Image (cartoon, rainbow, N blue to C red):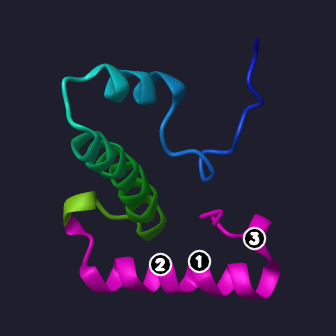
Amino acid sequence: MDLPSQQPSTQFLTLEESEKVDAALLSSPEKFLTRLTISSLKLLKHIAQEYGVAIEDLTTQQVIAWFEKDGKVRREQGLESAYLKW
């Protein structure tokens, strides 16, 4: 059965990645942190691409500014216009 495709912004872990985490010999808290870390890496890649810099060159202020901008888009234009869907 095919699952409906989601935009990258609404699904940070693919089904395959999630299955790999589930199969790992990790405790539940470790699996949660692993999922969070993989998702964070993908989000940082997106933010770095928007700024035109390498991930390692992102500054704390750039990450904060990106979240502020995405939050403003969500508040002013609605959930579907924002990158993060929450």
From the viewer's perspective, is residue 78 above or below residue 32? below
Name the amino acid, label 2: Trp
Based on the displayed image, in which of its 4 quarters is residue 31 positioned?
top left
Picture disc at residue 79:
3
Left/right placement of residue 16 relative to residue 83 reads: left
Residue at mark 3 to residue at mark 1: CA–CA distance: 10 Å
Percent x, y for residue 35?
A: 35, 44
Picture disc at residue 66:
2
Dominant secondary structure of the residues highlighted in magenta in the image: helix
Based on the displayed image, in which of its 4 quarters is residue 43 positioned?
bottom left
Image quadrant holding the N terminus, namely: top right
Percent x, y for residue 5?
A: 73, 32
SS at badge 2: helix
Name the amino acid, label 1: Asp
Of callouts 3 and 2, the N-terminal one: 2
> Mark 1 sits on what residue?
70
Q: How many marks?
A: 3
Left/right placement of residue 1 relative to residue 67 reads: right
* Boundaries of the magenta span: 57-86
